[in-house]
Amino acid sequence: MRAYLCNAFGPLDTHGPGDLPPPVPADDEVVIEVAAAGVNYYDTLIVQGRYQIRPALPFSPGGEFAGTISSIGAAVEGFHIGQRVLAFNSFGGFAEKARARASQVFPLPDAVSFDQAAAALVAYATAWFALHDRGRLRAGETVLVLGAAGGVGLAAVQIARAAGCTVIAAASTPEKLDACRHAGAAIGINYRQEDLKEAVKSATGGRGADVVIDVVGGAYTEAAVRATAWRGRVLVIGFAAGDIPRIPANLLLLKGCELSGVFWDEFLRREPQACHNQVSAILAGIENGSLAPPIHGRYGIEEAGEALKELAERRATGKLLICPKR
Ligand SMILES: NC(=O)c1ccc[n+]([C@@H]2O[C@H](COP(=O)([O-])OP(=O)(O)OC[C@H]3O[C@@H](n4cnc5c(N)ncnc54)[C@H](OP(=O)(O)O)[C@@H]3O)[C@@H](O)[C@H]2O)c1
């Protein structure tokens, strides 16, 4: 079968399309004929050997994919061949077929397209887990989203807005801020040009943000902690800027605020039922139109490297998809 392959860990332009034997499911797995796979920031890291998981070589990246089940492991119950599903498997999805553990497969309602589903799983489930679970979001609160025009960022904007909150989006260009406003943000801050803490304070009448979604890291994290309200919750999700910040603990004391880690893959592994309930709520939100995953572009397997570069170079607004039948 055709797949986008990493034959050796290295820079993004060292990988490309190739052939792999079709996957065979282990007892607890299903194999899915992939209709659409979402591109995530960690796909750009895993092929460089810079992610916490280093798969055996050669492998295809692509951790979230939607399609139909084509074969089922001997111990799997509750799924059938031909069923429309959405799955998470850390890697393997930029290919015509991919394996996933049945516990990490979600039945897909007919009204949700493969593209919408593949664009939603990691980004929306991470943002939902962060805001509603780790962040205990309440209607009427103010949410600051850093990297707000990215995959997780736009999902967080929509989920917070749907929960009745005021969203302040921070991103690096006017075009990205327009996309955030379109997704429901009330206020946009260009954090390349404006002082983040001062801009948030001024937008909130000096009060600060109740909840912060941080997928960027670097110097922005401390500025965001300084821009939180009393009893604020800062949700640490990722470090797209590259640097892992160190935060002075006295800031947390003075503001009575929390810094909480958000690790969605681990949540899925450790608390599968709670995670499945959250994904069901997201799929219901897509069905009823309150959530709408923004799709930035679609690529075939042969051009998957372009999609990875587009993401790594900060050119994407919303999700990129790899569609093998394109
Ligand atoms: N903890 C978890 O469970 C979990 C789950 C999913 C993702 N993540 C992590 O969350 C982060 C964001 O993921 P994503 O899929 O939303 O990525 P994405 O779509 O690429 O968005 C990341 C955003 O970060 C900003 N950014 C700032 N500095 C950057 C840099 N040097 N390079 C690239 N982007 C930069 C960009 O916005 P501006 O240009 O506007 O600054 C970009 O839109 C990643 O670190 C990812 O690994 C963690």
Image (tube, grey):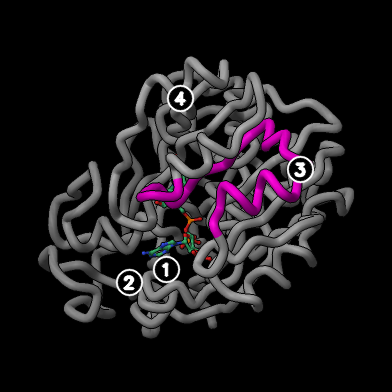
CA neighbours of label 4 inside 10 A, class few (<14), some (14 to 19), many (20+): some
For the point 14% across and 68% down, which residue is it?
Answer: 10
Tell me the mark number nearer the camera, choosing from 4 and 1.
Answer: 4
Residue annotated with mark 3 = 204
Does the magenta portion include 209? Answer: yes
Q: Could you give the CA–CA distance between mark 4 and mark 1, rounded to whole angstroms?
A: 49 Å
Query: Residue 320 versus residue 16: which sits nearer the camera?
Result: 320
Residue annotated with mark 4 = 251
Residue annotated with mark 1 = 96
Q: Could you give the CA–CA distance between mark 4 and mark 3, rounded to whole angstroms?
A: 19 Å
CA neighbours of label 3 inside 10 A, class few (<14), some (14 to 19), many (20+): some
Tell me if label 2 and label 1 are in contact, CB under 8 Å: yes
Residue annotated with mark 2 = 3
**SS for dot 2:** strand
**SS for dot 4:** helix
Ligand 1, by image quadrant, is bottom left
Give the magenta part as a residue range.
Answer: 195-220
For the point 54% across and 51% down, which residue is it?
Answer: 69
The relative height of residue 212 versus residue 22 in the rendered view (above or below) is: above
Give the quadrant of the C terminus. Answer: bottom right
For the point 43% across and 78% down, which residue is it?
Answer: 310
The three-letter code of the residue at mark 2 reads Ala
Tell me the mark number nearer the camera, choosing from 2 and 4.
Answer: 4
